[in-house]
């Protein structure tokens, strides 16, 4: 296959939001590590953390270099492999997310481009029952859901969610929609309660038939008025604004609160950004945040932990691949075309603000 020298890529030209994004002609990346795979990208996802970092909202951890090519998750076809690549070969259809830990050390993977390189260890073969477009939406959310539920079960001292009532706010968000499917179809949750905004109420069964047992309109109803206090065994927190409303629902003695969207502990933060970039004042801020969570949970024995998904743990990535291959989960997503820059910017705006979108934003290249 002829590989061109330049390609189209979605680029943030400077620090800021999606309104400034451009599609630029840039050089096609080349294989620089023996384990690199060059992909002809088919589709790529836009993720909140990355777009917020590009907008300058993570300055205490990381400031990207601009212009920055966007996207770290997606799907494509292998067009070249480095000499150290063991399993993948030219022509394979793959999906994955090139996000290592400590974070922010790799050059931006630029998956929202016609070509991108990634190390083989971050890629999985696409199962036949999914399209490349669908596969682009899955990696980070399946891995994070699997790891977060597993940690929640450890904190509960349980092997499965059978007989358990689960609360997952934002049931049609990218993370919430996947957390619910993994809870029910992988860990056997008996009852799942969720929240969505009013316009999405009618869409829940359309996107995820049979997954949710109770859906609350969080714009007009308070979860504590709809669910018996103390009746929830475990909450999976997905949004910065959703933790408080879930706490009264949890069993105050045995409840577990796992969260993917709150301040991490110092140990977790060190793994996320690397001990070398961890300063005493970041530690102080995180200690203060833990005090706030302890205060929120005062008078209860609820166990709380923030989990940061780890794509670099190959065993877990392969487990996620198995969950996908077995058809236990389906993508909940919306699609825009790279050729329609205005639609891309609008979708990315929803991602940065965490408002309005349904499922994962996938850009078709
Ligand atoms: N720890 C980790 O490993 C990890 C991994 C992935 C993502 N994350 C984080 O998880 C967060 C969510 O990511 P995401 O991909 O799920 O984002 P997303 O798909 O953009 O989710 C936001 C959606 O949730 C709804 N929503 C917002 N606030 C809500 C609330 N209080 N209650 C109910 N629904 C609400 C919004 O819909 P409406 O406007 O219609 O309400 C919005 O469309 C982000 O902060 C991201 O950085 C963490």
Image (cartoon, rainbow, N blue to C red):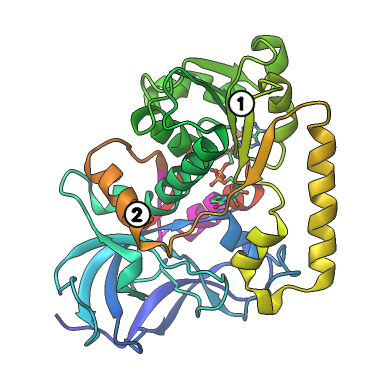
Q: Which mark is residue 136?
A: 2
Q: CA distance from mark 2 to mark 1?
A: 26 Å
Q: Residue at x 57, y 67 (%)?
A: 21
Q: Is residue 357 above or below residue 365?
A: above
Give residue 109's position: percent from left, percent from top. 45, 73
Residue 77 appears left or right of 212? left
Give residue 163's position: percent from left, percent from top. 45, 17
Residue 36 appears left or right of 262? left
Mark 1 Cα-neighbour bin, 10 Å: few <14, some 14–19, many ≥20: some
Camera sees residue 365? no
Q: Residue at x 57, y 54 (%)?
A: 308
Count of all numbered marks drawn on residues in the image: 2
Q: Is residue 185 above or below residue 152?
A: above
At numbered mark 1, what does the secondary structure look like: helix, strand or loop?
loop
The one nearer the camera, 347 or 253, is 253
Camera sees residue 93? yes
Magenta part of the protein: which range? 334-348
Residue on which the image places disc 1: 197
Q: Is 336 one of the magenta-colored residues? A: yes
The one nearer the camera, 95 or 182, is 182
Q: Which mark is residue 364?
A: none
């Amino acid at each position: 296959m002829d590989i061109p020298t330049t390609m189209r890529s979605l680029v943030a030209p400077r620090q800021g939001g999606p309104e400034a994004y451009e599609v630029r002609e840039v050089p096609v990346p080349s294989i620089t590590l023996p384990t690199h795979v060059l992909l002809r990208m088919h589709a790529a996802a836009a993720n909140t953390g990355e777009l917020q970092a590009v907008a300058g909202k993570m300055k205490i951890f990381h400031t990207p270099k601009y212009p920055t090519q966007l996207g770290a998750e997606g799907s494509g076809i292998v067009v070249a492999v480095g000499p150290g690549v063991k399993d993948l070969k030219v022509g394979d259809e793959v999906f994955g997310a090139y996000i290592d830990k400590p974070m922010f050390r790799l050059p931006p993977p630029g998956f929202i481009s016609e070509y991108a390189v990634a190390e083989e260890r971050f890629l999985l073969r696409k199962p036949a029952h999914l399209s490349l477009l669908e596969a682009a939406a899955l990696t980070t959310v399946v891995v994070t859901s699997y790891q977060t539920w597993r940690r929640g079960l450890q904190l509960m001292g349980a092997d499965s969610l059978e007989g358990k009532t689960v609360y997952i706010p934002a049931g049609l968000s990218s993370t919430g929609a996947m957390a619910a499917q993994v809870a029910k179809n992988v860990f056997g949750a008996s009852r799942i309660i969720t929240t969505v905004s009013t316009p999405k109420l009618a869409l829940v069964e359309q996107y995820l038939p049979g997954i949710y047992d109770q859906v609350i309109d969080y714009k007009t109803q308070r979860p504590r008025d709809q669910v018996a206090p103390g009746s929830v065994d475990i909450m999976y927190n997905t949004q910065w604004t959703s933790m408080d409303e879930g706490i009264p629902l949890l069993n105050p003695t045995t409840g577990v609160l796992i969260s993917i969207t709150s301040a991490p502990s110092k140990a977790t933060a060190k793994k996320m950004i690397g001990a070398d970039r961890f300063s005493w004042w970041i530690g102080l801020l995180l200690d203060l945040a833990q005090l706030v969570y302890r205060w929120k949970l005062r008078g209860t024995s609820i166990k709380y932990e923030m989990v940061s998904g780890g794509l670099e743990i190959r065993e877990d990535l392969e487990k996620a691949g198995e969950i996908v291959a077995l058809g236990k989960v389906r993508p909940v997503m919306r699609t825009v075309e790279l050729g329609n820059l205005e639609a891309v910017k609008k979708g990315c705006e929803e991602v940065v603000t965490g408002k309005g979108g349904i499922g994962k934003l996938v850009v078709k290249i």
